[in-house]
Image (cartoon, grey):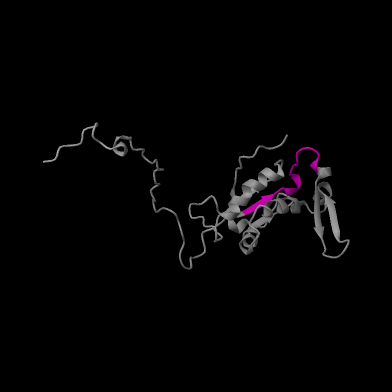
Amino acid sequence: MEAAASPETASPAETQPKTAVRRRPRKAYTGQTFVPKGPLPEPDRKWFLVDAAGLTVGRLASQIAPILMGKRHPRYATFMDMGDGVIIINAEKVVFRGDKWNQKLYRRHSGYPGGLREIKAKDLLAKFPDRILQHAIVGMLPKTKLGRQMAKKLRIYAGPNHPHRAQRPEPLALDTLRAQ
């Protein structure tokens, strides 16, 4: 039987301590990610009613866009339109902070030389009260065919009345503070 080598007779490579390589622990795959396969039936869409009176435009838009995309649901998939519909009333009573009513410009171009058209936010509110919110919300959606499809589920009305009683919209309480 061979005896174990004593520390005096061991080679220098064997006497140095071994350094362990630290590795990150691997995350276990739980298999709970929802990936729809094949043609799916039309999802059950809910409709929500939002009163925009006294709400700030950007804060309101940042909470409505995820609803239209469907990010509130566990079945969310980036390549499918799984979102709900939103009806916004009292769009003429939205609020901007600071002096944005006079400073903010909405621009569009006809495509011809000299075709740039600008309109101030207060003038746009006077002519088309719903377009301020529409511009803000649609600007937060994807710029694809799917984003245009999501934008079709958005209905904006200047006053307190809307013709969507058949959809039975649920009032949506947003966690946005009303301006004072």
Instruction: Reply yes or no: does residue 38 show up in magenta.
Output: no
Residue closer to the observer: 179 or 106: 106
Residue closer to the observer: 130 or 108: 108
Q: Is residue 146 visible?
A: yes
Q: Is residue 84 visible?
A: no
Q: Quadrant of the C terminus?
A: top right
Height in image: 18 above or below 104? above
Side (left or right) of 32 relative to 141: left
Give the percent coordinates (x, y) of residue 80.
54, 61
Residue closer to the observer: 157 or 146: 146
Please give the name of the residue rendered at 88% of the width and 61% of the height, measured from the top-left corner.
Answer: 114
Magenta residue span:
86-100
Residue closer to the observer: 162 or 93: 93
Please give the name of the residue rendered at 58% of the width and 55% of the height, measured from the top-left corner.
Answer: 69
Give the percent coordinates (x, y) of residue 179.
71, 36
Side (left or right) of 107 relative to 72: right
Please give the name of the residue rendered at 61% of the width and 42% of the height, measured from the top-left corner.
Answer: 174
Height in image: 102 above or below 16? below
Give the percent coordinates (x, y) of residue 169.
59, 52
Residue furthest toward the bottom? Answer: 39
Give the percent coordinates (x, y) of residue 171.
60, 47
Q: Quadrant of the N terminus?
A: top left
Side (left or right) of 13 relative to 137: left
Please give the name of the residue rendered at 21% of the width and 33% of the height, measured from the top-left corner.
Answer: 6
Residue furthest toward the left? Answer: 1
